[in-house]
Image: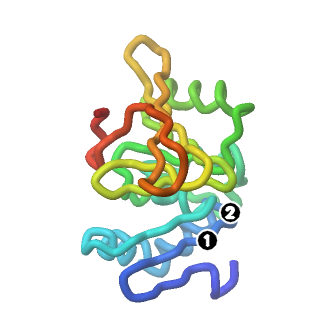
Amino acid sequence: MSGGDLVFVVGWSCIDGGNTFQLMHILRRSHQDTALALMHQDGAVVYGMSAGAIILGADIRIAAHFDDNEVVLDQLQGLKLLENTDVWPHYTPAHRDQVAETARRTGTDILAVPEDGAALIRDQWYSVGRPATLFLPRPTGQSATVTLDPWPGHGPACGAPNRTAAGQER
């Protein structure tokens, strides 16, 4: 990871990809995890790509599907900027069963974001570019899925349900 992997600009922050466990280790060691949470709390835009998106979630264990925990990180809690939601980047339909099973097993909502796609959370959750899918575990042991509505003016309407920023289905 180079010095350019974490970029701070007034009012927003971009967290690049790489090895999720190493990224979280560096953020914690430098106390940037706290700084990011405070920036988000103060209304700054926080953007994460790949590993950077995973750390925004509730837990980073999901990264084991992509990365080795070479730094032997034992504190696997994410920044929880997305409340009880984890992020699965680089999602393709081939991952559907694996993501659904992970959501069911962990009891955690999983936001699956495809390449060339993004999720934007304002008053509610939106897709930008290719649609993102939210996997919602259910007490029945199944997972329901919700395709996020496109950000207004940025793609065709899909007519699917959406969620509020507080995580409620609408």
What residue sits right under mark 1 in the picture? Answer: 16
Residue 147 lies, in percent from the top left, at 50, 35
Q: Is residue 74 visible?
A: no
Residue 37 lies, in percent from the top left, at 34, 69
**Which color mode does the image show?**
rainbow
Near-viewer residue (21 or 58) = 58
Residue that appears at 46% across and 77% down: 13
Which quarter of the rendered picture does the C terminus lie within?
top left
Kind of residue indicated by mark 2: Asn
Which element carries disc 1, helix, strand or loop?
Answer: loop
Residue 125 lies, in percent from the top left, at 39, 48
Which quarter of the rendered picture does the N terminus lie within?
bottom right
Up-down: is 108 above or below 49?
Answer: above
Q: Is residue 43 visible?
A: yes
Near-viewer residue (72 or 20) = 20
Whether tag 1 and tag 2 are in contact, CB under 8 A, the answer is: no
> Label 2: how many residues lie within 10 Å, few (<14), some (14-19) or many (20+)?
many
Give me the disc on residue 158.
Answer: none
Residue 26 lies, in percent from the top left, at 56, 74
Residue 70 is left or right of residue 129, and the answer is: right
Residue that appears at 49% across and 68% down: 47
Residue that appears at 43% across and 69% down: 46
Give me the disc on residue 19.
Answer: 2
Up-down: is 86 above or below 13?
Answer: above
Residue 72 is left or right of residue 109, and the answer is: right
Kind of residue indicated by mark 1: Asp
> Label 1: how many residues lie within 10 Å, few (<14), some (14-19) or many (20+)?
many
Up-down: is 100 above or below 123?
Answer: above
Which element carries disc 2, helix, strand or loop?
Answer: loop
Residue 166 is left or right of residue 161, and the answer is: left
Measure the C-alpha gap from mark 1 to mark 2: 10 Å
